[in-house]
Image (cartoon, rainbow, N blue to C red):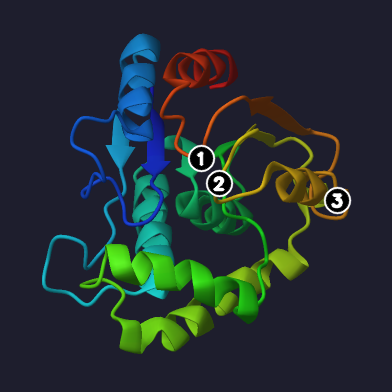
Amino acid sequence: MSNHLLVYVPGFPGEAIPRNLNEERVVDSIVKLSACKNIPLELVSYPGILNEEKFSFKNTQTHTLNFIKDKIEKGHDITLIGQSWGGLIALSAHEMFKLKKLILITPFILPLSREELEPLLNIYSVEFPNLIPNSSIRSCVDEISTIFNFLNDLNFNDMKNNDVRIIGALEDEIIPINLLREIVSNKKIFPNNVTFDEIKSDHNFTYSKADLESWLLHNV
């Protein structure tokens, strides 16, 4: 019996809170992929989303790293898939555990400054006030900035046998495609074994699900 396992790390706030009940989410494409490939799938759920635990961006990373560590210790061969914020967390897990395969979907891997982060968090604070109260925005910026720090030391040159594939969205309203291209083209971070593709879509592939699913089938 194969021990291959897909692990999906979602964007913020996680797949537990859909923004539009009539809209398919990226996770739906991941579920289809699991069924088509006949590979079991586990979804990471962030603490504090649906329970009384206090939400924090740092906890999303800590929880995910512990989740993946547990699966590795149980003998699973993991293909890790991260989208948006989950792409950043998945990348940090890949750096720690040297996983064989990493799939990043419109990943939030731009080391933004505090001045750039605050307006973004202000938007999320209005949309999700229970998770990011306006009074906590500055502490959230501190948390995210700390998580970003690992990008400064990230080096895939010692992981040349690892398979890293990244998909960007040409009309991404959150992760500008030109900035993502710049990060991925930085050979100090991502060497030549990293595959980067682009799809004409928005951040969450709301009108390009078929293109995303086709790309996933060919790359996972």
Residue flagged by tag 2: what amino acid is it?
Glu
Q: Nearer the viewer, residue 11 or 147?
A: 11
Q: CA distance from mark 3 to mark 1?
A: 22 Å
Residue flagged by tag 3: what amino acid is it?
Asn
Q: Position of residue 112 (x, y in %)?
A: 66, 69
203 in relation to 36, above or below: below
Q: Quadrant of the N terminus?
A: top left
Q: Nearer the viewer, residue 123 or 190?
A: 123
Q: In percent of the image, x 79 and y 39: which residue is there?
A: 160
Q: Does residue 1 appear in this view?
A: no
Q: CA distance from mark 2 to mark 1?
A: 6 Å
Report the side of 217 relative to 55 (left or right): right
SS state under label 2: loop
User: Which residue has dot 3 on it?
Assistant: 186
Q: Position of residue 67 (x, y in %)?
A: 34, 55
User: Which residue has dot 1 on it?
Assistant: 203
Q: Nearer the viewer, residue 25 or 86?
A: 25
User: Mark 3 or mark 1, which is nearer to you?
Assistant: 1
Report the side of 199 relative to 65 (left or right): right
User: Which residue has dot 2 on it?
Assistant: 173
Question: How many numbered marks, from 0 up?
Answer: 3
Badge 3 vs badge 2, beta-carbon distance below 8 Å: no
175 in relation to 194, above or below: below
Residue flagged by tag 1: what amino acid is it?
His
Q: In percent of the image, x 87 and y 55: which residue is there?
A: 188
Q: Position of residue 40 (x, y in %)?
A: 31, 26
Q: In percent of the image, x 62 and y 49: which residue is there?
A: 98
Q: Position of residue 132 (x, y in %)?
A: 31, 75
Sequence order check: which comes first, mark 3 or mark 2?
2
Sequence order check: which comes first, mark 2 or mark 1?
2
Badge 2 vs badge 1, beta-carbon distance below 8 Å: yes
Q: In percent of the image, x 41 and y 50: which residue is there?
A: 11
